[in-house]
Image: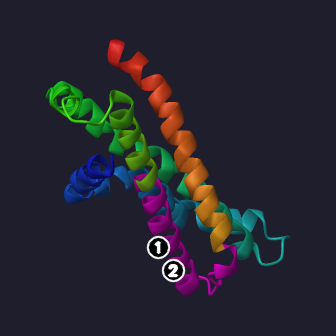
Amino acid sequence: MKGLMYRNLKIYFSNKSGVFFSLMGALISFVLYLIFLSQNMVNSWSDVPDTKLLLDPWLIGGTMTITAITTTLSSLSLMVQDREKNILSDLSLTDVSYLGIQCSYLLTAMIVGTVMQLVMYFMMGGYFMIADKSPLNMTVFPQILGTAVLSSFISVSYTHLTLPTILLV
């Protein structure tokens, strides 16, 4: 199963445009916030002290949620491609069970979702650290990592439960 997970990760991360476009939804929300919403929200919340220190983590959390959904779904598209190209039938000839093959797709999607969420977290945190002089608090990193793993698990679970319905249509 480790070999299949390595294969899936290698295929996902070797497609640079696929990685970029799986992050596109998160990047769009981040850029829209910076260009249009940031100043409007700061003005609306002017009564709250240190408004940016409240709004920046809020945006990071929402964007990480978008990242979990889009990247795990993009990673699970490999499973659909393998079914389409009959690679799944070839994989079933190995000593890995069908359940093991399916678990490798799901675990790979969880790893991809978690890694990409952390990439977005550090990218946005770095931007806000430079632009707003807000510190990147590393003491909460274990909670962020746990939330990223849980969010990836939920996204993969939901997608995997609804994917057979989508494939039948």
Tag 1: Cα neighbours inside 10 Å, few (<14), some, or many (≥20)?
Answer: few
Instruction: Give amino acid for label 2.
Output: Gly
Q: Secondary structure at mark 2?
A: helix
Identify the residue shown where x is 57% and y is 78%: 128
Residue 123 tag number: 1
Q: Residue furthest top?
A: 169
| Tag 1–tag 2 contact (CB < 8 Å) | yes
Q: Is residue 169 visible?
A: no
Q: Nearer the viewer, residue 152 or 65?
A: 152
Relative image position of residue 73 (x, y in whole percent): 40, 40
Instruction: Give amino acid for label 1.
Output: Met
Which residue carries the number 2 mark?
Answer: 126
Query: What is the span of residues highlighted in magenta in the rendered image?
Result: 112-140
Tag 2: Cα neighbours inside 10 Å, few (<14), some, or many (≥20)?
Answer: some
Q: Secondary structure at mark 1?
A: helix
Quadrant in which the C terminus appears:
top left
Which image quadrant is residue 119 in?
A: bottom left
Give the colouring mode of the picture.
rainbow
